[in-house]
Image (cartoon, helix red, strand yellow):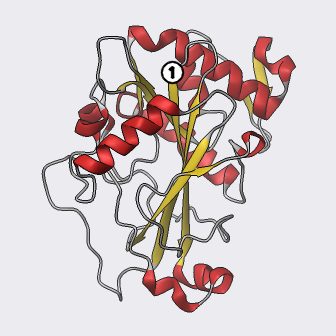
């Protein structure tokens, strides 16, 4: 299969930051499109058609939040009139029907971002993953994480200790409406495939320096929905050739060590 790659990335993935590396985000830049839009959207369409059960999940409790998120994305990317429209025209020229009974499936066809909805009831100590469209997982599977709390979701991450877990939960508790946050990770890969689900138990690919010819980086955003107050974790995936990373950000490309993927 032909690799789907960006040629540039709008942040420096080589910068080492202390975990969790959260920064404030301009709400106007919550969602972005890039030069791989058409190819990534075609891949998303294929996955949503052929592997829907693997890439979409929605619990009954999350339906109001999922519908609110759909309206928010439509307004943000396609204009206020799109909120009541039956279809929209994507930048790649494809007309997309809006199925309001399938909010997560519709979201998967509208943007390059994957979306995870996390909610915390009054009797819960942590936010729980209650809905998602996850076409481009990097070493995790939606089925294993669905309806699990934050600590369980991050169980395989070596750096996700109790201290980081407490800080992340405070971030999810504290994120304010209209004041989204963002972070990034960056990992070397030998395989540029976007859809890379793997179970919690088992080895993960650790390519040698010679094999690691691609950089995979996720621009991760955290946003609170104003009505349901659910938290939305967005994932915009970039995959670039090593030489393109070096050309844009310098020869320090060999220094990437943000191995904090799920």
**Which residue is nearer to you in this view: 255 or 53?**
255
* In the rendered image, the vertical position of residue 180 relative to residue 230, given as above or below: below
Q: Quadrant of residue 113?
A: top right
| Residue depicted at x 63% and y 38% | 180
x, y (%) of residue 105? 53, 25
For the question of whether residue 102 can be seen, the reply is no
x, y (%) of residue 91? 80, 43
For the question of whether residue 195 can be seen, the reply is yes
* In the rendered image, the vertical position of residue 52 relative to residue 6, given as above or below: above
* Crowd band around label 1 with a 10 angstrom C-alpha radius: few (<14), some (14–19), many (20+): many
x, y (%) of residue 50? 43, 34
In the rendered view, does 91 fall on the left or right side of 62? right
In the rendered view, does 75 fall on the left or right side of 99? right
Q: Which residue is mark 1?
A: 230
**Which residue is nearer to you in this view: 247 or 184?**
184
* In the rendered image, the vertical position of residue 155 relative to residue 2, given as above or below: above
| Residue depicted at x 80% and y 40% | 93
In the rendered view, does 181 fall on the left or right side of 84? left
């Amino acid at each position: 299969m032909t690799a789907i790659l960006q040629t540039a990335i709008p942040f420096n993935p080589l910068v080492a930051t202390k975990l969790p590396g959260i920064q404030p985000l301009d709400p106007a830049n919550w969602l972005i499109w890039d030069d791989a839009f058409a190819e990534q959207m075609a891949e998303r369409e294929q996955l949503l058609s052929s592997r829907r059960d693997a890439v979409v999940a929605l619990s009954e409790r999350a339906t109001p939040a999922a519908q609110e998120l759909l309206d928010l994305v439509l307004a943000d990317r396609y204009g206020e009139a799109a909120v009541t429209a039956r279809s929209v025209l994507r930048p790649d020229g494809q007309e997309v029907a809006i199925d309001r009974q399938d909010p997560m499936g519709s979201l998967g066809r509208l943007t390059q971002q994957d979306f995870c909805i996390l909610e915390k009831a009054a009797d819960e100590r942590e936010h729980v993953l209650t809905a998602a469209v996850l076409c481009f997982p990097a070493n995790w599977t939606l089925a294993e994480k669905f309806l699990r709390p934050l600590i369980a979701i991050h169980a395989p991450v070596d750096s996700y200790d109790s201290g980081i877990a407490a800080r992340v939960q405070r971030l999810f508790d504290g994120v304010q409406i209209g004041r989204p946050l963002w972070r990034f990770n960056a990992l070397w890969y030998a395989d540029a495939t976007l859809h890379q689900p793997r179970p919690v138990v088992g080895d993960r690919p650790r390519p040698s320096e010679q094999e690691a010819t691609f950089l995979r980086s996720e621009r991760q955003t955290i946003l609170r929905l104003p009505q349901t107050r659910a938290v939305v974790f967005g994932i915009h995936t970039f995959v670039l050739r090593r030489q393109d990373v070096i050309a844009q950000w310098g020869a320090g490309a060999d220094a990437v060590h943000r191995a904090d993927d799920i």
